[in-house]
Amino acid sequence: MTTPIKSIMQGLSLAGLVVAAGQATAQEEPVELTLYYPVAVGGALTDVIDGLVDDFEADHPNIDVNAIYAGNYDDTRVRALSAIEAGDAPQLSVLFSIDLFELIEQDAIVPFDDVVETDEERAWLDSFYPGLMENGRLDGETYGIPFQRSTIVLYWNKDAFEAAGLDPEQPPQTWDEMAEMANTIRDAGDGDDQWGVMIPSTGYPYWMFQALAFQNGHRLMSDDGTEVYFDDPAAVEALEYWVSLTDEYQAMPDGTIEWGTLRQNFLEESTAMMWHSTGNLTAVREGADFDFGVSMLPAKEQPGSPTGGGNFYLFKDSTDEEKRAAMTFVRWMTAPERAAAWSMETGYMGVSEAAYETDALSDYVEDFPAAAVARDQLEHSTAELSTYQGGRVRRALDNAVQAALTGQMAPEEALQQAQQEAEAALRRYAR
Protein backbone atom coordinates (compact mmCIF):
# COMPACT_ATOMS: atom_id res chain seq x y z
CA MET A 1 0.00 0.00 0.00
CA THR A 2 1.30 3.45 -0.84
CA THR A 3 1.86 5.44 2.34
CA PRO A 4 0.74 9.09 2.69
CA ILE A 5 4.36 10.20 2.64
CA LYS A 6 5.14 8.27 -0.53
CA SER A 7 1.99 9.42 -2.31
CA ILE A 8 2.64 13.05 -1.45
CA MET A 9 6.28 12.83 -2.43
CA GLN A 10 5.30 11.22 -5.74
CA GLY A 11 2.77 13.98 -6.32
CA LEU A 12 5.11 16.91 -5.76
CA SER A 13 5.63 18.93 -8.89
CA LEU A 14 9.04 19.23 -10.52
CA ALA A 15 9.03 22.88 -9.55
CA GLY A 16 8.45 21.90 -5.91
CA LEU A 17 11.41 19.56 -5.99
CA VAL A 18 13.59 22.27 -7.46
CA VAL A 19 12.57 24.62 -4.64
CA ALA A 20 13.30 21.93 -2.05
CA ALA A 21 16.64 21.20 -3.59
CA GLY A 22 17.41 24.88 -3.68
CA GLN A 23 17.37 25.00 0.11
CA ALA A 24 20.74 23.27 0.18
CA THR A 25 23.95 25.21 0.13
CA ALA A 26 25.95 24.25 -2.95
CA GLN A 27 28.49 21.64 -1.94
CA GLU A 28 31.64 20.91 -3.93
CA GLU A 29 32.34 17.75 -1.93
CA PRO A 30 29.77 15.36 -0.45
CA VAL A 31 28.85 16.07 3.16
CA GLU A 32 28.13 13.10 5.41
CA LEU A 33 25.71 13.54 8.29
CA THR A 34 24.95 11.21 11.18
CA LEU A 35 21.42 11.45 12.56
CA TYR A 36 20.51 9.79 15.84
CA TYR A 37 16.80 9.09 15.86
CA PRO A 38 14.55 7.75 18.65
CA VAL A 39 12.08 5.02 17.79
CA ALA A 40 9.94 4.66 20.88
CA VAL A 41 6.31 5.78 20.53
CA GLY A 42 3.61 4.62 18.16
CA GLY A 43 5.39 1.61 16.67
CA ALA A 44 8.39 1.13 14.40
CA LEU A 45 8.99 4.15 12.20
CA THR A 46 12.28 3.15 10.69
CA ASP A 47 10.81 2.43 7.25
CA VAL A 48 9.16 5.86 7.19
CA ILE A 49 12.34 7.66 8.21
CA ASP A 50 14.43 5.61 5.79
CA GLY A 51 12.05 6.57 2.99
CA LEU A 52 12.32 10.24 3.86
CA VAL A 53 16.11 10.05 4.00
CA ASP A 54 16.17 8.40 0.57
CA ASP A 55 13.96 11.12 -0.86
CA PHE A 56 16.11 13.82 0.69
CA GLU A 57 19.31 12.34 -0.71
CA ALA A 58 17.71 12.14 -4.14
CA ASP A 59 16.95 15.86 -3.91
CA HIS A 60 20.38 16.66 -2.43
CA PRO A 61 22.94 14.33 -4.03
CA ASN A 62 25.82 16.02 -2.23
CA ILE A 63 24.48 15.27 1.26
CA ASP A 64 24.49 11.75 2.70
CA VAL A 65 22.46 11.07 5.85
CA ASN A 66 23.17 8.04 8.02
CA ALA A 67 20.16 7.48 10.29
CA ILE A 68 20.96 5.54 13.46
CA TYR A 69 17.97 4.26 15.43
CA ALA A 70 19.01 4.42 19.04
CA GLY A 71 16.02 3.23 21.07
CA ASN A 72 13.84 5.52 23.17
CA TYR A 73 14.53 9.19 23.82
CA ASP A 74 16.70 8.56 26.87
CA ASP A 75 18.73 5.93 25.04
CA THR A 76 19.21 8.29 22.11
CA ARG A 77 20.41 11.14 24.31
CA VAL A 78 22.89 8.88 26.09
CA ARG A 79 24.23 7.51 22.80
CA ALA A 80 24.57 10.97 21.27
CA LEU A 81 26.40 12.40 24.30
CA SER A 82 28.60 9.30 24.51
CA ALA A 83 29.54 9.71 20.86
CA ILE A 84 30.54 13.30 21.53
CA GLU A 85 32.77 12.24 24.43
CA ALA A 86 34.35 9.60 22.21
CA GLY A 87 35.18 12.19 19.57
CA ASP A 88 32.66 10.81 17.09
CA ALA A 89 29.93 13.40 17.44
CA PRO A 90 26.84 13.26 15.24
CA GLN A 91 25.84 16.38 13.37
CA LEU A 92 22.18 16.31 14.33
CA SER A 93 19.63 14.31 16.26
CA VAL A 94 15.98 14.17 17.24
CA LEU A 95 15.97 14.25 21.04
CA PHE A 96 13.42 15.11 23.70
CA SER A 97 12.35 18.72 23.57
CA ILE A 98 12.90 18.72 27.35
CA ASP A 99 16.59 17.82 26.92
CA LEU A 100 17.31 21.46 26.09
CA PHE A 101 18.84 22.51 29.43
CA GLU A 102 21.03 19.41 29.71
CA LEU A 103 22.28 19.76 26.13
CA ILE A 104 23.14 23.42 26.72
CA GLU A 105 24.85 22.63 30.02
CA GLN A 106 26.90 19.93 28.26
CA ASP A 107 27.85 22.53 25.62
CA ALA A 108 26.69 19.98 23.04
CA ILE A 109 24.44 22.04 20.76
CA VAL A 110 24.35 25.36 18.95
CA PRO A 111 21.34 27.56 18.25
CA PHE A 112 19.97 27.52 14.74
CA ASP A 113 20.29 31.32 14.86
CA ASP A 114 24.06 30.85 14.51
CA VAL A 115 23.62 28.91 11.27
CA VAL A 116 20.86 30.75 9.41
CA GLU A 117 22.05 33.31 6.88
CA THR A 118 19.06 34.63 4.94
CA ASP A 119 15.80 36.36 5.75
CA GLU A 120 13.98 33.31 4.40
CA GLU A 121 15.81 31.08 6.85
CA ARG A 122 15.11 33.46 9.72
CA ALA A 123 11.41 33.45 8.78
CA TRP A 124 11.50 29.64 8.86
CA LEU A 125 12.54 29.76 12.52
CA ASP A 126 9.31 31.62 13.26
CA SER A 127 7.04 29.41 11.13
CA PHE A 128 6.22 26.83 13.82
CA TYR A 129 3.40 26.84 16.33
CA PRO A 130 4.47 29.01 19.29
CA GLY A 131 3.27 26.38 21.77
CA LEU A 132 5.77 23.91 20.33
CA MET A 133 8.61 26.41 20.57
CA GLU A 134 8.34 26.88 24.34
CA ASN A 135 10.60 23.87 24.81
CA GLY A 136 12.89 24.87 21.95
CA ARG A 137 13.92 28.41 22.79
CA LEU A 138 15.97 29.93 25.58
CA ASP A 139 17.07 33.53 26.07
CA GLY A 140 15.73 34.47 22.64
CA GLU A 141 17.65 31.81 20.70
CA THR A 142 16.23 28.76 18.91
CA TYR A 143 17.94 25.50 19.85
CA GLY A 144 15.22 23.00 18.96
CA ILE A 145 13.10 22.67 15.82
CA PRO A 146 9.87 20.70 16.43
CA PHE A 147 9.35 17.50 14.48
CA GLN A 148 7.98 14.50 16.37
CA ARG A 149 5.65 16.50 18.61
CA SER A 150 2.54 15.63 20.53
CA THR A 151 0.13 16.47 23.29
CA ILE A 152 -1.72 14.07 25.57
CA VAL A 153 -5.24 13.34 24.34
CA LEU A 154 -8.14 11.27 25.60
CA TYR A 155 -9.16 8.24 23.56
CA TRP A 156 -12.59 6.75 24.26
CA ASN A 157 -14.41 3.65 23.13
CA LYS A 158 -17.80 4.77 21.81
CA ASP A 159 -19.20 1.24 21.87
CA ALA A 160 -18.35 0.91 25.56
CA PHE A 161 -19.98 4.26 26.29
CA GLU A 162 -23.16 3.20 24.54
CA ALA A 163 -23.22 -0.17 26.30
CA ALA A 164 -23.03 1.66 29.65
CA GLY A 165 -25.91 3.98 28.74
CA LEU A 166 -23.68 6.99 28.09
CA ASP A 167 -23.82 9.22 25.03
CA PRO A 168 -21.13 7.74 22.77
CA GLU A 169 -20.52 11.11 21.11
CA GLN A 170 -19.89 13.00 24.35
CA PRO A 171 -16.50 12.48 26.04
CA PRO A 172 -15.96 13.90 29.52
CA GLN A 173 -15.30 17.60 29.66
CA THR A 174 -14.37 17.87 33.35
CA TRP A 175 -12.60 15.83 36.01
CA ASP A 176 -15.91 15.05 37.71
CA GLU A 177 -17.47 13.89 34.46
CA MET A 178 -14.54 11.62 33.67
CA ALA A 179 -14.59 10.01 37.10
CA GLU A 180 -18.36 9.52 37.04
CA MET A 181 -18.40 8.18 33.46
CA ALA A 182 -15.54 5.82 34.22
CA ASN A 183 -17.35 4.57 37.31
CA THR A 184 -20.56 4.05 35.32
CA ILE A 185 -18.71 2.01 32.71
CA ARG A 186 -17.03 -0.13 35.35
CA ASP A 187 -20.33 -0.77 37.13
CA ALA A 188 -22.07 -1.63 33.86
CA GLY A 189 -19.52 -4.35 33.21
CA ASP A 190 -20.65 -6.41 36.19
CA GLY A 191 -17.10 -7.19 37.17
CA ASP A 192 -15.77 -7.95 33.71
CA ASP A 193 -12.28 -7.00 32.63
CA GLN A 194 -13.08 -3.56 31.24
CA TRP A 195 -12.05 -0.57 33.34
CA GLY A 196 -13.46 2.91 32.96
CA VAL A 197 -10.21 4.81 32.46
CA MET A 198 -6.46 4.24 32.50
CA ILE A 199 -3.78 6.93 32.86
CA PRO A 200 -0.27 5.48 32.41
CA SER A 201 2.04 5.81 35.39
CA THR A 202 5.22 4.27 34.01
CA GLY A 203 7.38 5.65 31.24
CA TYR A 204 6.38 9.29 31.65
CA PRO A 205 4.31 9.65 34.86
CA TYR A 206 5.59 13.21 35.33
CA TRP A 207 3.99 14.11 31.96
CA MET A 208 0.54 12.82 32.93
CA PHE A 209 0.80 14.46 36.32
CA GLN A 210 1.83 17.73 34.74
CA ALA A 211 -1.36 17.64 32.67
CA LEU A 212 -3.48 17.21 35.79
CA ALA A 213 -1.64 19.98 37.64
CA PHE A 214 -2.01 22.34 34.69
CA GLN A 215 -5.71 21.53 34.42
CA ASN A 216 -5.93 22.58 38.05
CA GLY A 217 -4.42 25.95 37.17
CA HIS A 218 -0.86 25.18 38.24
CA ARG A 219 2.44 25.29 36.37
CA LEU A 220 5.12 23.00 37.78
CA MET A 221 8.32 24.88 36.86
CA SER A 222 9.86 28.25 36.11
CA ASP A 223 10.63 29.29 32.55
CA ASP A 224 14.38 29.38 33.19
CA GLY A 225 14.57 25.79 34.40
CA THR A 226 15.87 26.64 37.87
CA GLU A 227 12.79 26.11 40.08
CA VAL A 228 9.92 23.62 40.49
CA TYR A 229 6.68 23.82 42.45
CA PHE A 230 5.70 20.21 43.08
CA ASP A 231 4.18 20.58 46.55
CA ASP A 232 1.81 23.46 45.77
CA PRO A 233 -1.74 22.76 47.03
CA ALA A 234 -3.04 22.69 43.45
CA ALA A 235 -0.49 20.01 42.56
CA VAL A 236 -1.40 17.98 45.65
CA GLU A 237 -5.07 18.18 44.70
CA ALA A 238 -4.22 16.95 41.20
CA LEU A 239 -2.45 13.87 42.54
CA GLU A 240 -5.25 13.24 45.00
CA TYR A 241 -7.70 13.21 42.09
CA TRP A 242 -5.57 10.70 40.18
CA VAL A 243 -5.51 8.42 43.23
CA SER A 244 -9.27 8.82 43.70
CA LEU A 245 -9.99 7.26 40.32
CA THR A 246 -9.00 3.99 41.97
CA ASP A 247 -9.72 4.49 45.66
CA GLU A 248 -13.00 6.38 45.47
CA TYR A 249 -14.47 5.63 42.05
CA GLN A 250 -13.09 2.10 41.51
CA ALA A 251 -12.79 3.11 37.86
CA MET A 252 -9.07 2.49 37.34
CA PRO A 253 -6.94 -0.50 38.41
CA ASP A 254 -4.69 0.00 41.40
CA GLY A 255 -0.92 0.02 41.19
CA THR A 256 0.94 1.29 38.17
CA ILE A 257 -0.32 1.23 34.58
CA GLU A 258 2.25 0.50 31.90
CA TRP A 259 2.87 3.15 29.26
CA GLY A 260 4.16 0.66 26.73
CA THR A 261 1.16 -1.68 26.81
CA LEU A 262 -1.67 0.78 27.40
CA ARG A 263 -2.45 1.25 23.72
CA GLN A 264 -2.90 -2.50 23.36
CA ASN A 265 -5.07 -2.53 26.49
CA PHE A 266 -7.31 0.03 24.83
CA LEU A 267 -7.45 -1.90 21.56
CA GLU A 268 -8.32 -5.08 23.48
CA GLU A 269 -11.08 -3.12 25.28
CA SER A 270 -9.54 -3.56 28.72
CA THR A 271 -10.29 0.12 29.30
CA ALA A 272 -12.96 2.35 27.81
CA MET A 273 -10.82 5.50 28.09
CA MET A 274 -7.11 6.13 28.06
CA TRP A 275 -4.81 9.12 28.24
CA HIS A 276 -1.98 8.76 25.77
CA SER A 277 0.16 10.56 23.21
CA THR A 278 -1.40 11.68 19.96
CA GLY A 279 1.57 9.86 18.43
CA ASN A 280 -0.52 6.69 18.81
CA LEU A 281 -3.43 8.01 16.78
CA THR A 282 -2.70 6.29 13.48
CA ALA A 283 -1.89 2.99 15.21
CA VAL A 284 -5.19 3.14 17.14
CA ARG A 285 -7.11 3.95 13.96
CA GLU A 286 -5.57 1.00 12.18
CA GLY A 287 -5.95 -1.41 15.12
CA ALA A 288 -9.35 -0.65 16.64
CA ASP A 289 -12.26 -2.90 15.64
CA PHE A 290 -14.69 -0.64 17.51
CA ASP A 291 -15.79 2.95 17.05
CA PHE A 292 -13.59 5.34 19.01
CA GLY A 293 -13.21 9.05 19.56
CA VAL A 294 -10.39 11.43 20.47
CA SER A 295 -10.82 14.58 22.52
CA MET A 296 -8.91 17.15 24.48
CA LEU A 297 -8.22 16.24 28.09
CA PRO A 298 -10.91 17.10 30.66
CA ALA A 299 -10.62 20.29 32.69
CA LYS A 300 -10.73 21.26 36.35
CA GLU A 301 -9.93 24.98 36.52
CA GLN A 302 -8.94 24.99 32.83
CA PRO A 303 -8.40 22.54 29.97
CA GLY A 304 -4.91 21.73 28.82
CA SER A 305 -1.98 19.43 28.25
CA PRO A 306 1.78 19.80 28.22
CA THR A 307 3.34 19.40 24.82
CA GLY A 308 5.68 16.48 24.32
CA GLY A 309 7.93 14.69 21.88
CA GLY A 310 11.13 15.47 20.06
CA ASN A 311 13.01 18.33 18.41
CA PHE A 312 15.83 18.46 15.93
CA TYR A 313 19.11 19.72 17.43
CA LEU A 314 22.39 20.75 15.78
CA PHE A 315 25.55 19.55 17.51
CA LYS A 316 28.43 21.89 18.19
CA ASP A 317 31.28 19.51 17.28
CA SER A 318 30.74 19.71 13.52
CA THR A 319 32.10 21.87 10.75
CA ASP A 320 30.30 24.92 9.43
CA GLU A 321 29.65 23.01 6.22
CA GLU A 322 28.12 20.13 8.17
CA LYS A 323 25.93 22.49 10.19
CA ARG A 324 24.63 24.09 6.99
CA ALA A 325 23.93 20.67 5.48
CA ALA A 326 22.23 19.52 8.68
CA MET A 327 20.01 22.59 8.71
CA THR A 328 19.14 21.94 5.06
CA PHE A 329 17.97 18.47 6.08
CA VAL A 330 15.91 19.84 8.99
CA ARG A 331 14.28 22.45 6.75
CA TRP A 332 13.45 19.77 4.20
CA MET A 333 11.98 17.45 6.84
CA THR A 334 9.79 20.18 8.34
CA ALA A 335 8.50 21.59 5.03
CA PRO A 336 4.68 21.78 5.07
CA GLU A 337 4.09 18.88 2.65
CA ARG A 338 6.34 16.52 4.57
CA ALA A 339 5.08 17.67 7.97
CA ALA A 340 1.56 16.98 6.70
CA ALA A 341 2.48 13.52 5.43
CA TRP A 342 4.33 12.72 8.66
CA SER A 343 1.27 13.68 10.69
CA MET A 344 -1.00 11.42 8.65
CA GLU A 345 1.47 8.55 8.78
CA THR A 346 2.03 8.64 12.54
CA GLY A 347 -0.55 10.75 14.37
CA TYR A 348 2.04 13.29 15.53
CA MET A 349 1.15 16.90 14.92
CA GLY A 350 1.90 18.86 11.82
CA VAL A 351 4.30 21.34 13.39
CA SER A 352 3.20 24.46 11.53
CA GLU A 353 0.02 26.14 10.43
CA ALA A 354 1.21 25.77 6.85
CA ALA A 355 1.19 21.97 7.24
CA TYR A 356 -2.53 22.00 8.03
CA GLU A 357 -3.15 24.31 5.06
CA THR A 358 -1.85 21.71 2.60
CA ASP A 359 -4.55 20.01 0.57
CA ALA A 360 -3.47 16.60 1.82
CA LEU A 361 -3.71 17.29 5.57
CA SER A 362 -6.73 19.58 5.17
CA ASP A 363 -8.63 16.80 3.40
CA TYR A 364 -7.40 14.23 5.92
CA VAL A 365 -8.65 16.30 8.88
CA GLU A 366 -12.00 16.82 7.18
CA ASP A 367 -12.35 13.05 6.79
CA PHE A 368 -10.83 12.22 10.21
CA PRO A 369 -11.42 15.12 12.63
CA ALA A 370 -9.51 13.35 15.41
CA ALA A 371 -6.33 14.29 13.55
CA ALA A 372 -6.85 17.93 14.54
CA VAL A 373 -7.43 17.43 18.26
CA ALA A 374 -3.78 17.68 19.33
CA ARG A 375 -3.29 20.79 17.19
CA ASP A 376 -6.43 22.43 18.60
CA GLN A 377 -5.29 21.62 22.13
CA LEU A 378 -2.17 23.74 21.57
CA GLU A 379 -4.38 26.71 22.42
CA HIS A 380 -4.54 25.25 25.94
CA SER A 381 -1.02 23.84 26.18
CA THR A 382 1.99 24.44 28.37
CA ALA A 383 5.66 23.62 27.96
CA GLU A 384 6.63 20.12 29.08
CA LEU A 385 8.48 19.88 32.41
CA SER A 386 12.04 20.89 31.63
CA THR A 387 14.75 22.00 34.07
CA TYR A 388 18.43 21.77 34.68
CA GLN A 389 19.30 18.37 36.13
CA GLY A 390 16.17 17.23 34.33
CA GLY A 391 16.72 13.52 34.84
CA ARG A 392 17.03 13.85 38.62
CA VAL A 393 14.13 16.26 38.87
CA ARG A 394 11.76 14.16 36.76
CA ARG A 395 12.82 10.99 38.60
CA ALA A 396 11.90 12.58 41.91
CA LEU A 397 8.45 13.46 40.58
CA ASP A 398 7.97 10.07 38.90
CA ASN A 399 8.75 8.33 42.18
CA ALA A 400 6.30 10.56 44.06
CA VAL A 401 3.49 9.86 41.61
CA GLN A 402 4.06 6.12 41.73
CA ALA A 403 4.37 6.09 45.53
CA ALA A 404 0.96 7.77 45.80
CA LEU A 405 -0.71 5.54 43.22
CA THR A 406 0.56 2.37 44.88
CA GLY A 407 -0.48 3.52 48.35
CA GLN A 408 3.04 3.77 49.74
CA MET A 409 2.72 7.47 50.54
CA ALA A 410 -0.04 10.06 50.75
CA PRO A 411 -0.02 12.47 47.79
CA GLU A 412 0.99 15.48 49.90
CA GLU A 413 3.84 13.62 51.59
CA ALA A 414 5.08 12.20 48.29
CA LEU A 415 5.12 15.59 46.57
CA GLN A 416 6.83 17.27 49.51
CA GLN A 417 9.60 14.69 49.27
CA ALA A 418 9.87 15.22 45.51
CA GLN A 419 10.09 18.98 46.05
CA GLN A 420 12.94 18.57 48.52
CA GLU A 421 14.85 16.26 46.17
CA ALA A 422 14.35 18.61 43.22
CA GLU A 423 15.44 21.65 45.20
CA ALA A 424 18.62 19.82 46.21
CA ALA A 425 19.34 19.05 42.55
CA LEU A 426 18.65 22.64 41.47
CA ARG A 427 20.30 24.50 44.34
CA ARG A 428 23.38 25.56 42.39
CA TYR A 429 21.25 26.99 39.57
CA ALA A 430 19.24 29.39 41.77
CA ARG A 431 19.23 32.93 40.46
Image (tube, helix red, strand yellow):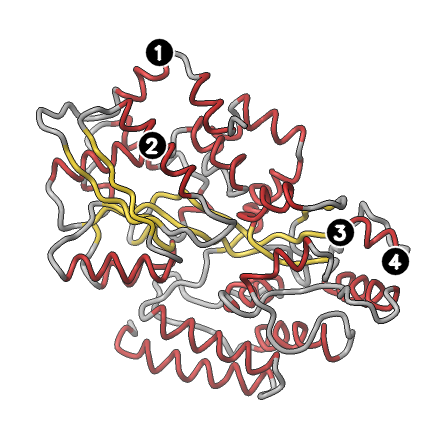
Q: How many marks?
A: 4
Q: Check disc 3 and report the residue beneath it.
A: 157
Q: CA distance from mark 1 to mark 2?
A: 20 Å
- Left or right position of 414 against 294: left
At label 3, counting other C-alpha atoms closer than 10 Å, the crowd grade (few under 14, some 14-19, many 20 or more) is: many
Q: CA distance from mark 1 to mark 4?
A: 55 Å
Considering depth in this image, is 61 or 391 the residue closer to the camera? 61
Which quadrant does the N terminus fall into?
top right
Where does residue 421 sit, x and y in percent of width and height?
Answer: 40, 83
Among numbered discs 1 and 2, the one appearing first in the sequence: 1
Q: Is residue 188 above or below residue 163?
A: below
* Amino acid of disc 4: Ala
Residue 164 circle label: 4
Q: Check disc 2 and report the residue beneath it.
A: 124
- Left or right position of 231 against 266: left
* Amino acid of disc 3: Asn
